[in-house]
Image: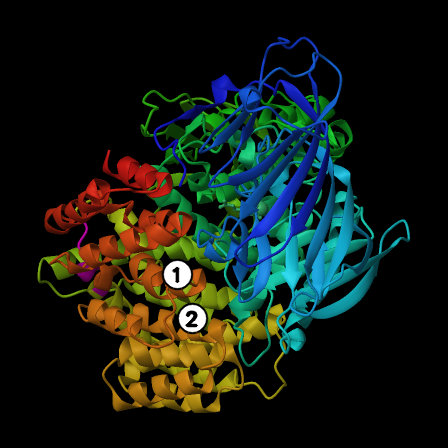
Amino acid sequence: MRTDTGRTINLADYRPTDFVLERVDLTFELDPTETKVEARLIFHRREGVDPAAPLVLDGDELKMTGLLFDQIEMEPARYTETADSLTIRDLPESAPFEITVTTLINPEANTQLMGLYRSNGIYCTQCEAEGFRRITFFPDRPDVLAVYTVNIIADKAANPLLLSNGNFLGGAGYGEGKHFAAWFDPHPKPSYLFALVAGDLGVVEDTFVTMSEREVALKIYVEHGKEARAAYAMDALKRSMKWDEEVFGREYDLDIFMIVAVSDFNMGAMENKGLNIFNDKYVLADPETATDQDYANIEAIIAHEYFHNWTGNRITCRDWFQLCLKEGLTVYRDHEFSADQRSRAVKRIAEVRHLRSEQFPEDSGPLSHPVRPTEYREINNFYTTTVYEKGSEVTRMIATIVGRDGFKKGMDLYFERHDGEAATVEDFVKCFEDATGRDLTQFSLWYRQAGTPQITVSSSYDAAAKTFSLSLEQMVAATPGQTAKEPMHIPLRFALIGENGAEAQPTAVSGGEVSGDVLHLTERSQTFTFSGIGARPVVSLNRGFSAPVNLHFAQSTEDLAHIARHDSDLFARWQAITDLSLPNLTAAAEAVGAGKPVECGSALCEALLAITADDSLEPAFRAQALALPSESDIARELGANNDPDAIHQGRQAILAAIAKAGAATFRALFDGLASSQPFSPDAAGAGRRALRNAALGFLALSENSPAGAVEAFAEADNMTDLSQALTVLAHRFPDATETHAALAAFESRFAANALVLDKWFSIQATIPGNGALDRVMRLMQNPHFTASNPNRVRALIGTFAFANPTGFNRPDGKAYHFFAEEILAIDKRNPQLAARLLTALRSWRLLEPVRADQAREALMSIERAPALSSDVADIVERILK
Ligand code: ARG
Ligand code: ZN
């Protein structure tokens, strides 16, 4: 276990290493419990560094069995080994020298899934952020770039496949049933991008011809028998490679690109140079077992990891504080890719939903941190939605401010200027300033200042003067470590919409910079006045969600309905529906809390049903409109003193009112959208299924009978429809015999498919109400529940904590205490997984006092427990602070 649990790392303390690493030669003799790793490292002292300075290498849980200096055994007096470091003294002043370290590691016992471990008999690695130091002693930081050669020796029958980064050099027999393979990666890389895979896997092969006509071999490795389920991933990979050439001018740079799917993985996937390793959830798909959401995730994550080859690998991060440099930018790139492959507006709506439900709560709670943090205790806890998704939004705002061409010029300059380097956020921003001449000094606050900006808006129209004024005031609440905030540069896309839906064109604007359809809010408070406006317009503000902010704009119901009906920006129409629904949903929660009947405003019902029935709109968009704000969205809107039961019941009552008013529409949609075509996972097909399944949910409410869902379950020919029907049954009719029968049928039909069983666990973990905890505890006794598999733990315990507000927040606090015990048990095996799950409690302070007290007690029982990992200690202490 790491021993530096108390140490905080500060950005301000960054300095380059004393020694430059020139070359790395690794030899692995693989064995399930005793793998021998020999690392030959060639260093020289950096110019100007104190000649007495020692070389300090990082380590974690390592057993060193040999140490050579220039091939000669090193005298013990020259080095010191501690639990997490190896310090070597008396080294040459400037001449290169070679250190050879031999370590013994136990992949089978590596339940943390960091470093080299075994998953289902496959050797694999995960080195980001600090896993390489669990393989050998090394300067394990991203600004140490070197060229690697890797030799792998292993039993041939058990491991016909021996893979590492770069290009294959050769292989041969190695006596006694063993063989070896050698790999060479010509591109200098940091250790976190190292990868090794060995074992017996099936493969799907293809080729890609690059823009300069080089042929690249593409290989996706999966468990034997699952090859057919990798076809979609391969297709997504080829589309990603083409798109990066066309849109960013980026070509792949090795002869081979490999993806390996493993079933035990702490996160989604990893961009190791030339050898991506994936959670198999984001590779395997076929219509029988994958939902449309699975297909969309696979497409996005395959693209994301591939795009890292340029944004992350060719240009990497100087230190881990710069994580958003590769993650925010690469998420932006994968968002743009998916938008080009699918419907841009629908994709944007899904992104904003995700940002609001995940990042906004993070940014307003105890774990809030800047996109580029300035300190951390445990870097694994900073792979957050703020670094990734808000980081992507910040990149998007740069594109909005400098424009399409300016953004392209800036990116080209970034690739040209920093290729082969470990860069910083400042380097990145400078490229856009130098390429376009735009000053981004104030804009850069987005990287440093945490918290979601709140913008209060008001407007007035002067008919006599034909002027329209828009007043904006920005405020960012205090966040941990940051009390006083400065005004930010916020680019807001907007339109002034006239009576008939046409956009008014002002003859002049005063009060601040407006360029095209972008209004630049830069001061704390600013009034923009538009001249030449003949009639009072309706403002559509923050179109396309051009800035990740919260608008407080008391627009009238009529104005919102106008936008919902007439805006040419589909995102804005969806936003208007959301703005119409939120007051109804919060009022409903309050009514339930006060024991009063719930009412649903007619404007909401009318606008929503008009969109639902409008066949000129794409089905996926209509489905998004029908998916009203979630219970956690409503909780956030209410702000404090939340009662999850009242929020749930209020929301259900609103849904029931819409179901009743729209019963005929939903029936017509459900029947009319039945597919006669063979299944295709494309966006159009997915949109039709989404709308049809939304209709099914409303029909179940208005008919108050499981019959429709039972029929849909029986007729489904794909996993989207099947799992949606099962969800309707389980969530609306949990005690019906039909539901028990469907759950049992699903379980036995997919007993051999772990990824589908995960869905079965999740659907049950999210059944609302007080009975959820007992159900979850019972499911943990199910023979299919494997506590060592992160996907399974996330599917049951994670989904329960993150996505079942009424069940998890039962007023007696029993679920919190159950959860605390599970976190402690998981922490013993896999600290990263435990710490991630624990963030489910980050918003505990917003609960009403009875629940909040229970949650605090559960958190304190974690904090008090002995031998916490640094990962969990860091999260629990910040959440309680
Ligand atoms: N870089 C990986 C990605 O593509 C994720 C690595 C996450 N690592 C971690 N220690 N949590 O986003
Ligand atoms: Zn990434």
> From the viewer's perspective, is residue 287 above or below residue 149?
below
Q: Nearer the viewer, residue 641 or 822?
A: 822
Disc ID at residue 758: 2
| Spot occupied by residue 201 in the image (x, y as percentages of width and height) | 66, 69
> Which quadrant of the view contains residue 586?
bottom left
Disc ID at residue 92: none
Q: Amino acid at mark 2?
A: Asp
> From the viewer's perspective, is residue 499 above or below residue 751?
above
Please, which residue is most extreme toward the right here? 213
Q: Pick the quarter of the image with the N terminus.
A: top left
> From the viewer's perspective, is residue 534 above or below residue 33?
above
Q: Amino acid at mark 1?
A: Arg
Q: Which residues are magenta?
A: 642-648
The tag earlier along the polypeptide, 1 or 2, is 2
Residue highlighted by disc 1: 794
Residue 376 visible, this angle: yes
213 is within the stretch colored magenta: no
Q: Nearer the viewer, residue 397 or 739?
A: 739
> Which quadrant of the view contains residue 133?
top right
Q: Verify CB contact (< 8 Å) between mark 1 and mark 2.
A: yes
| Spot occupied by residue 368 in the image (x, y as percentages of width and height) | 36, 36
643 is within the stretch colored magenta: yes
Residue at left offset 23%, top offset 83%? 735
